[in-house]
Image (spheres, rainbow, N blue to C red):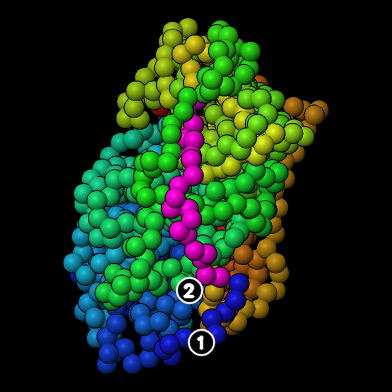
Amino acid sequence: MSDPVSLPHDIVEMPHIEIPMPDGCRLAARVWMPEGAEGASVPAILEYLPYRKNDMTQERDASMQPYLAGHGYAVVRLDLRGAGDSEGLMEDEYLPQELQDGFDAIAWIAEQPWCDGNVGMIGISWGGFNGLQIAAMRPPALKAIVTLCSTDDRYADDVHYMGGCLLGEQLSWASIMFGRNTLPPDPRNVGDRWRDMWKTRLNGSGLWLKNWLEHQTRDDFWKHGSVCEDWSAIQIPVFAVSGWADGYCRTVFRLMENLQGPKKGLVGPWAHRYPHLGEPGPAIGFLQEELRWWDQWLKGVDTGIMDEPPLQLYMQDSAAPAGWRAHRSGRWVAEPGWPSPHVTRTDFRLGADGRLSRGAELPHGSLSHRSPLDVGMGSGKWCGYSKPGDAPVDQRRDDGGSLCFETGPLEAPLEIAGDANLTLEFSVDRPVAQVAARLVDVAPDGRSNRVSFGVFNLNHRDGHEAPEVLVPGERYRATVPMKHVAQRFAVGHRLRLAISTSYFPMTWTPPEPVTLTLHTAGSHLELPLRSTSPLDETLTDFAPAVSAPPIAKAVHEEADGFWHITEDAANGTMEIHLADGGGHFTLQDNDLTIYDQGYERYRLTHDDPTSVGGEVEWEYRMERDDWSVRTHTHTQLTADKNDFIVKARMTAWEGEEIVHSEEWDERIPRHLV
């Protein structure tokens, strides 16, 4: 990535300002703007997050916000109520108070002398969520949004549940926020208030994992903030972005299909990252694309961005499996909208002899299968961050414990774009069951790369709001939706469909071992086969990725980072142990030294679904001069046949003194999960 050579405007930065809310609470913001904006107002762009504007996101923000400010925008990075340097308490994600605060902050920004009254919102993940949610509230000054790696449906597509199955990512994410919620504001910004603000957070933030486990179906808890409940509420232009390695790519397609206002979609090969920082590459000049979007909708400049194809996708080539890759070969393709006229949904039949075919007559029959519990240990993260190990590894071991159907070697390349769907006619021998379906690209030498997957709680076959018990031996039908993807399968490669009855730690296992009987005559795989689009030839290359100059940062110790999959053959146990964090470093512009490090473990004992468990711990330290704080959190999730069991503890120190310590021991009944 290169730095921009020059910017049209000099920049003024305000590291800390406070925005008053109607109830008196003050929210902390960091602002970048062109010099002279107070006498010649400019449009504003808001990013609204709980991730601490002056430390945790400072490095990333510095790569982006000065670039936009230098091109004539006031950029506001706002901390949520109860996060960073903002007053108040944050008790969960996307609560009505958070969204109302965002609505009110936009009104405040629009009234400032440096703002011309036009505001946009951008955000990745959390900020992409609340950008959509606040857009649906229709603040008068909000004119357009850019939403990256976000969701329109909090139950169907977030870290909590997928296909009615409990995601292991729920434990991971809850634990990350558990740790971050223990952090105090910075005394340099809030003064002597910091200690009282900190105590409010330590006493009141709560155990979010318990909140989420108490809502195992698509109830009002998840419908709140799910903009798919009323697409018509969003009337302003929306630019939706994601990546195939991200957990949220399906949202781009639903937004493109259902929003009625101006819209644009972009899906690259990336994980959960901004595209100018995108891995796997190629990264693109996303800041330039973002600038064109804002110039179009906030300044009224015809940049030509809306004359280009509405939806651009990265068509990935066949690739060897790898737990991490820097680059993914492929090409950009274009669609006139979604659904695309260039995509034909095509049935592939499942044969009792293990064949997968779209044309040949196949023998029918009933196939019974029970997967070993270690199927899924090679699945990687539901939401990849392009950290070493978080992508799926070679699938041969997982596929060996699955029911598989396979084509012959391809005689011509085959391309898909969109979502595959697996329709099953099945019976099971237990009242609670799930399936995982994976589409795998098998190279001539046998190496197997997962292309897409879907998981589905079979008790949710008639909807996610009111699951029903399965009657052992009775025949049912269900459709398993898979993640969207654009993939070119090479000549000589084979397509494999792998079906398993568990997929831990991607999803939590059913309470008992399940044998699935698949009736092939009533089952098929529907693939979105893509033909060449004339629009493909109209595309021009994206500009190279650029970034604003990096901040001054002294690294004292690199973060511990690994992803280990181990098996104890003597005891029949398997474990994933991974490390992630920011390491130990000093941000030199505010002289703040930070340490953050986390570890996750997921384990199982073969043939015992109640043996599966996970635990996550995070440690944070912040220091400046004689000010020092430290926090440690630990969360454990296990289950028996009837309940999920959560044990957690949190300890906070000021200097060497423990200022808060709390423990939780909770049991949450399983609801057909």
The residue nearer to you, when weighing 644 against 131, is: 131
Q: Which residue is painted at 27% across and 81% down in the image? A: 115
Task: Judge the density around disc 2: few (<14), some (14-19), many (≥20) Cα neighbours within 10 Å.
Answer: many
In this view, the residue in front, 173 or 626, is 173
Q: Look at the image and tell me in which quarter the C terminus lies.
A: top left
- Is 271 inside the magenta-drawn segment? no
Does 361 appear above or below 642?
above
In the image, what residue type sits under mark 1? Ser
Residue appearing at x 57%, y 32% in the figure: 438
Residue 6 numbered mark, or none: 1
Question: In the drawing, does residue 184 fall left or right of residue 75?
Answer: right
Relative placement, left or right, of 464 versus 51 is left
What residue did someone put label 2 on? 64
Residue 213 visible, this orientation: yes
- Say the numbered circle drawn on residue 662: none
The image shows residue 617 at horizontal and vertical percentages of 60, 51
Pinpoint residue 579: horizontal percent, then vertical percent.
Answer: 66, 53
Residue 345 falls in which quadrant of the image? Answer: top left
Q: Percent x, y for residue 75?
A: 37, 76
Residue 517 visible in image: no
Q: Position of residue 577 (x, y in %)?
A: 68, 45
Question: Could you tell me the amino acid type at mark 2?
Answer: Met
Q: Which residues are magenta?
A: 525-544
Query: What's the distance in space between the residues labelled 1 and 2, CA to CA?
Result: 14 Å
